[in-house]
Image (cartoon, grey):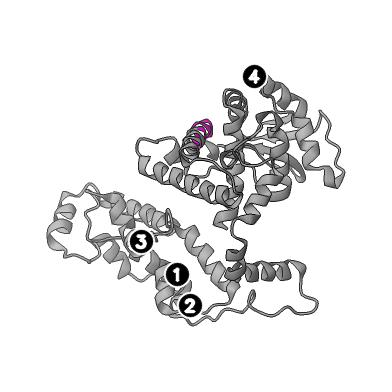
Amino acid sequence: MWNAVLGAVLTASLWWLVSSSDAYLHNFKKGHGKGHLPWPLDVFSNTRHHNVCESEECKETAHTLLTSMDMTVDPCEDFYTFTCGGWVKSHPVPPTAPHRNQFDLVTEQLDYQLRGTLLSVQRAVYLGATSLNYVAGETEQSDILEEEDSEGELAPVRAAKQMYRACLDTEEVERQGVSTVCELLTQHGGWPMAQEHWDEGQFDWQAVLVSMARRLGLFPLVLLYVHFDRTNTSRNVITVDQPSLVLPRSMLVDPATYSSQLRAYRRWIIDATAEIVKDQNQNVPRSKISIDAFDVVEFEVKLAKLTSFDEMRRNVYRMHNPMTVRDLQKWTDSAETQMKLQWKDLLESLFQDINATISQNEKVEVRELDFMFNLMKLISRTPKRVVGEHSLRTVSKQRILN
């Protein structure tokens, strides 16, 4: 909601200029009807200066800022609604989405551009498109994903077309059911929640992490990726970070406030597991699945509480922790737990296809030092079954939802 935020900043600046005038506030409350601009904005809107931008882009931006505000609200009573109320009213959260913001709008616009669909005026307005031409439906998009394959086209484009067609083939998706999910789960040792007999002794959580990262790009406990070195952007460095969470962190760390959402999440886990149990002809009582689902959500709540909130992660100095693999190993081992993550073995397994040599002196960038330390403690006091249920639940979630 960057436009609304920018509008709030601009309006706050104007309001500061007149905040000391009691007569102004009186006039605003008594002398202006609803929907009229307060006098500072009215003055500026009727003033012509040689340096005022008159381009279509500037007019479009000004229109967006003004429509994002709600002039019927007294800013002294509710400043947020005054500056952002218009945007909130014109962009209701869809029933299938948890939130609505500018990033959602841009993503949806890009999706439609890739698909090659000409949006109707009604659809464009619903999406909150900011471009005047886009809202009017005057800009026709090119057929990228719906075009036939052509000789010599780029491999990524052809792959995207194939994926798009596969997603549209609902008959094949329904025919396969959850069989592909079950196959993936079996390849990773099986989902404990969906098995009558699950051997905890055969579960190697580090091997599962490697397999999920290499084959599926999933990181349920630790996020690993290669990124440019912040101290020398001409080279890259292995980066270790906290993982993404299934639900927003704000929900998981405050289960009392978001109890209904967590109950719905548990029901989803139970229903998804029941479908997998049915497909695999297992005899797992629903009561047992319910207990396991409760344990998984409790573990994810504890995991979320170990992560840093977004405001903390804005401090780039706090998140800049270069060290060697040896130093990282010493740091996590200092948690003095029975369960230990062997970082050198983990990294070697992840990069084995490119013949990369990972030594104890390999430099890594650790974004969240405290998280890595506390993660070892959490895993050590958590039953292997629950760790496996959480890790493999990310497989079922991604495949079932996608």
N-term mark: 3 or 4 = 3
Q: How crowded is mark 2: few (under 14 residues within 10 Å), some or many (20 or more)?
A: many
Dot in front, 2 or 1 = 2
Contact? badges 2 and 1 (CB < 8 Å): yes
Is 312 situated above or below 248? above
Secondary element at image label 3: loop
Dot in front, 1 or 3 = 3
Q: How crowded is mark 1: few (under 14 residues within 10 Å), some or many (20 or more)?
A: some
* Distance from Cα at disc 3 to Cα at disc 4: 48 Å
Residue 261 in view of the camera: yes
User: Of residues 70 and 225, which is closer to you in this image?
Assistant: 225
Mark linked to residue 337: 4
- The residue located at (63%, 55%) in the rendering is 179
* Distance from Cα at disc 2 to Cα at disc 1: 10 Å
N-term mark: 4 or 1 = 1
Mark linked to residue 119: 2
Residue at label 1? 129
Residue at label 3? 92
Relative horizontal placement of residue 246, taking residue 232 as reference (left or right): left
The kind of residue on which mark 1 rests is Ala
Is 270 situated above or below 172? above
Dot in front, 2 or 4 = 4
The image shows residue 385 at horizontal and vertical percentages of 60, 32
